[in-house]
Each structure stands twice: as C-alpha cells, then as structure tokens.
Image (cartoon, rainbow, N blue to C red):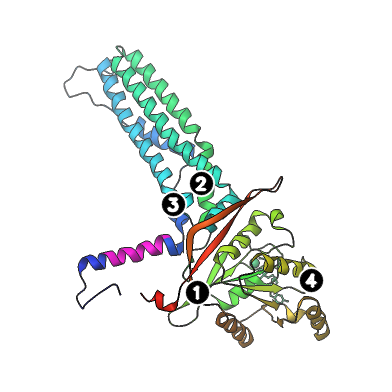
Amino acid sequence: MFFTGNKIKKHEVIFFSYSVKFVESWCNILSQFKRIRHIPTSDKLADIVFSKLRKIKVEAPSGSKKRRSDQSFHKTLYFRQFRYLFPELEERLEKIAKGFPIIDELHPFHIELIEVLFGTDKIRTALSRINNTRKALKSISRDVNKRLGISETPAESKKARAEALGRVGSTISKLKKPLDTLIDAKIQLSRVPDFNLTQHTIAFAGGPNAGKSSFVKLVSTGRPEINAYPFTTKELSIGHRKRNQFESIQLMDTPGLLDRPLGERNAIEMRSILALKYLTDLIVFLYDPSVQSPLSLEQQLNLYEEIKAQFEEIPTICFINKQDTLTKEELAEVRSLVGDYEAISTLEENTPELERIITEIIESLPPKKFVYDKKKEEKIIEEPGKRRLKEHKIEWIFFDEEDSED
Ligand SMILES: Nc1nc2c(ncn2[C@@H]2O[C@H](COP(=O)(O)OP(=O)(O)OP(=O)(O)O)[C@@H](O)[C@H]2O)c(=O)[nH]1
Ligand SMILES: [Mg+2]
C-alpha cells in the first residue's frame, strides 16, 4: 500500500497525485498530439515577428535635438529591434520543437501510425531542420550585432539591418516544408481518439459498409457517421459502455477493410490494422451478406482469415449482420459458406437481442492482465516499391493478480 498509518503526509499526497497524473497523461491515455500547442505556418511566423518588430520605436528624449537622421538614433533603434527579434524567434522555434513528442518515446501504435502516414524520418527531419534554424539565427544575430556595432553612418546601419532581415526572412521561409509537415502530423494524429490503455477495447472490424459504425452507435456512447455507401468511416473512433460500476469498456469503430495483402493497404485501412494490432483486446468481425456489400462473401471470408492469421493472439467473435435482408434459406447458405455464426441486425434500434449479444461479448473479454513493455524487437519488412512498415513484436509481461495488489 502507498499510504501507511492514518495520517497522510502532504508530500505523500503531492507525490501521489503527481504520479497519478503522470501515469494518466503519458502512459495510459493516448492523447499526446492533442496537447501540442499551435504550430504556425512559416508565413504566419514571419508575419508575427516582423510586424511586432516594426512596432518597436525609439523616442528621442524630450528637448533633445536628436533627429531621425542621427547615427546613434538608428543604432539604438536597430539594436533594440534585433534584441526583440532573435530571442522571440528562438523561443517560438524552441516551443515548436520541444512541444512535439519525442518519437522514440511514443506508444508503438503512434510510432507505426506516424511511419505509415508520414514516415518517422520525415518528422525527425522536420524537427532537426527547426533546431538547425535556431543555430542559423544565432549566427545571423552575431553578424548583425557586429556590423551594427562598427557602422559609422545611418546608411551603413540601414544596410546591415536590411541584409540581416533578408537573411532572417529567407531562413524562416525555408521552414515552410518542415512546419507544414508538423502541422499536418498534429492535425492527423489529434484525430486519434484518447484511448485509455487500462480499459478493454473491443474493435468492430469487417469489410466496408458491413454495419460496424451502426453497431457501435447502438450499443455505446459513440456517435460515428453512418451512410448507405462504403468507406464512410475514415478515422478510428471510440464509444464507451459501462461494464459495471467501476469499469468502462471502449468500443472502437474502424474503417472498412478490403480483401488484400497488408502491403497494398492504404493509410485509411492501416489505421484499422494498427489499432487491431496494438489497442484491441477482442475483435468483433461483421459479415455483410447483403447485396450492398462491396465485397463478396468469399472476399469477406478471405479478409477474416487474413485478420485471424495476422492477429492470432486476439480472440475474435463473428456475426452475420443484416439478417433482415436474408430469407431463412439464404441465411443457411451464408452460414454454410462463412461459418455457423449468429445472425444479427444493427439497422435501427438497440433491441433486447442486441443488448444480450453485446453483454455476452463483453463477458467474453479476456482479463486485462498485461502491461506494455517498451523493450521490443523490431524488424523492417522491405517490399520493393512499397512503403516500409515496421513490425514491432510486443512483449506482454504477465503478472498474477496477487502481484498486482502490491
Ligand atoms: N438492412 C440492413 N442495413 C443495415 C444494417 N446495419 C447497418 N445497415 C446499413 O448499412 C449501411 C452501412 O452502415 P454503416 O454502419 O455505416 O457501415 P460501416 O461498416 O460502418 O461502413 P464503413 O464505415 O463505410 O466501412 C447503412 O446504410 C446502414 O443503415 C442491418 O442490420 N440491416
Ligand atoms: Mg463506418
């Protein structure tokens, strides 16, 4: 137990709440990307700093005969402007670079998602370009300070200032690509739901249009978009459902999968695959026997077998959805082809039947008795002409219930 005796000491409370916060924020809830502060485009960054710079003025002391043409006036003004400009840029770039999570410290789901969506190297390059720019700005700052220091006429000072501002401007504009990459990564990765890694996650998977979103919507707090056409769901989303007074389950809606090998899957499908791989405790696979399905039953069977083979350690439950579209004979035929699974309907409302089914699904969840171990083996699969995909071998550390109470 953490607390011993009746009196709880203040430092214990602080430490305890800090540890809870720490564990929640970095280990258990996958939401790092939502916390990244605003990243400006290079144009916006230049706009902000240059417009502030232009507002910096120097007042000649009252009664002074100093005029705007005086050399000391120019020097004072320009030194003051650069004393603002360089630290301001340095601070903004530092915030951007340090505000972005360190890739190697992320959960492997995020690492692999970044690899698939952008390439981790592209993000690393973007971050290192920003850090290098900070160094480049330091050198411009040294140069201009030196030149201003030795300039003897307003014309010389003006020239030094103009050249330095030109160099700063072009340095900022070279940040266009890296900043755009980071903005895109922040936007796309922020759309990943806040998975709580301590909660069970049930993934609804299957071909496009199979009724995955309909199922999640009917039995959880999730409100995914449902449409009569395939490929409606393009992002992962989760809904919650109480298992009991203390426990909540995450029901995950996934984009539809086509019957094709891993190497040919697009970035939308890869979201589903990676979520199955890293975040799922149990897969609910839906067959769609209706004529609206873009996949034939044979293709859906292939897809199921591919998923089963790829994630053999994850228990899977299959259902034949849209039973309302089938006659008894047709259902028997479907069963003879794909397997003798329960037939359901997720069309309109949550029926007592669907409630029974989701309760049974939740009851069949394996106990969540593993923690993720960062030490992982990696191998790179190289397929000619295909995007590189990192395969992480996850090691789960099993521990007994008794150990967990310590
Ligand atoms: N007849 C019938 N239609 C259903 C049933 N369940 C869902 N649908 C319909 O099937 C269509 C697709 O449903 P979705 O829930 O969006 O399917 P999905 O698997 O999430 O589709 P994607 O996100 O595109 O992969 C919608 O028009 C639903 O109303 C059902 O049990 N019977
Ligand atoms: Mg959907």
Element carrying mark 2? helix
If you read the primary sequence from the N terminus, does the residue marked by circle 3 or circle 1 appear first?
3
**Real-space Cα distance between discs 1 and 2?**
35 Å
Question: Dot 2: within a 10 Å radius of its alpha carbon, few (fewer than 14), some, or many (20 or more) residues?
Answer: some
Q: Position of residue 53 (x, y in %)?
A: 35, 31
Q: Position of residue 291 (x, y in %)?
A: 80, 71
Q: Nearer the viewer, mark 4 or mark 2?
A: 4
Asked if disc 1 and disc 4 are in contact, CB closer than 8 Å, the reply is no
Quadrant location of ligand 2? bottom right
- Residue 314 visible in image: yes
**Real-space Cα distance between discs 4 and 2?**
41 Å
**Residue drawn where x is 52% and y is 40% of the image:** 125
**Real-space Cα distance between discs 3 and 4?**
44 Å
Start and end of the magenta stretch? 15-26
Element carrying mark 1? loop
Determine whether, in the image, residue 304 is placed left or right of residue 368.
right
Three-letter code, disc 2: Ile
Kindly identify which residue carries mark 3.
36
If you read the primary sequence from the N terminus, does the residue marked by circle 1 or circle 4 appear first?
4
Three-letter code, disc 3: Ile
Three-letter code, disc 1: Lys
Kindly identify which residue carries mark 4.
297
Q: Quadrant of residue 304?
A: bottom right
Residue 22 against residue 118 in the figure, above or below: below
Q: Magenta region, mostly helix, strand or loop? A: helix
**Real-space Cα distance between discs 3 and 2?**
10 Å
If you read the primary sequence from the N terminus, does the residue marked by circle 4 or circle 2 appear first?
2
If you read the primary sequence from the N terminus, does the residue marked by circle 3 or circle 2 appear first?
3
Question: Dot 4: within a 10 Å radius of its alpha carbon, few (fewer than 14), some, or many (20 or more) residues?
Answer: some
Three-letter code, disc 4: Leu
Kindly identify which residue carries mark 2.
183
Which one is in front, 4 or 275?
Answer: 4
